[in-house]
Image: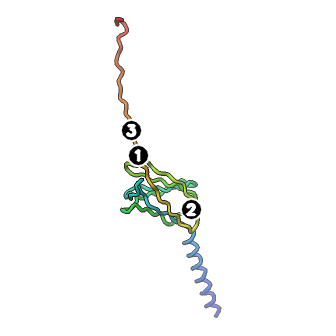
């Protein structure tokens, strides 16, 4: 009889450890939209842990959705970028076993690059007339 009790105790401890390991993480998901509410597929969604500076990067799906699962709890910065839109950045604090839904509305914006290419012309200062 004591062997059966020991077996049940070991089984209970193994199951408890497995359940504890599964609940020690959290998740973050949401939808990426434009100002009119239209979905933005293919947006780059980056999640950065502010304590460790580790990042995870994914693309939003065909319906604009993104999901980060099995994330360690802590403070994060979520950055979303897409062509034709300004980058969106939001801070989020994730708690153990408390998934967060964070929808992101992108603002229209264009990144401009200005290139100046100039050559100096020579000025004649010796025989110039006024």
Q: Is residue 72 left or right of residue 114?
A: right
Dot 2 or dot 1: first in sequence order is 2
Seen in the picture, residue 129 relative to 75 is either above or below; the reply is above
Quarter of the rendering occupied by the N terminus: bottom right
Q: Are marks 2 and 1 in contact (CB under 8 Å)?
A: no
**Distance between mark 3 and mark 1 Cα atoms:** 13 Å
Query: Dot 3: what SS?
Result: loop
Q: Residue at x 47, y 63 (%)?
A: 29
Q: Which residue is mark 2?
A: 94
Residue 63 image position (x, y, % from top left): 38, 63
Query: Dot 2: what SS?
Result: strand
Q: Which residue is mark 3?
A: 113
Instruction: Sort mark 2 into few (<14), some (14-19) or many (20+) by Cα contacts within 10 Å.
Output: some
Pick the front one: 9 or 61: 61
Q: Is residue 33 left or right of residue 101?
A: left
Q: Which mark is residue 109?
A: 1
Q: Which mark is residue 65?
A: none
Q: Residue at x 34, y 19 (%)?
A: 121
């Amino acid at each position: 009889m004591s062997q059966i009790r020991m077996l049940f105790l070991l089984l209970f401890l193994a199951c408890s450890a497995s359940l504890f390991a599964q609940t020690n993480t959290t998740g973050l998901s949401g939808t990426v939209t434009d100002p009119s509410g239209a979905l933005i597929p293919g947006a780059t969604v980056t999640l950065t842990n502010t304590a460790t500076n580790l990042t995870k990067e994914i693309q939003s799906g065909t319906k604009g959705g993104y999901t980060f699962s099995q994330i360690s709890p802590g403070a994060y910065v979520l950055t979303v970028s897409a062509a034709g839109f300004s980058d969106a950045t939001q801070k989020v604090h994730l708690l153990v076993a408390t998934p967060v839904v964070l929808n992101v509305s992108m603002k229209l914006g264009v990144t401009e690059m200005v290139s100046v290419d100039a050559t100096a012309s020579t000025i004649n200062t010796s025989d110039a007339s006024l």
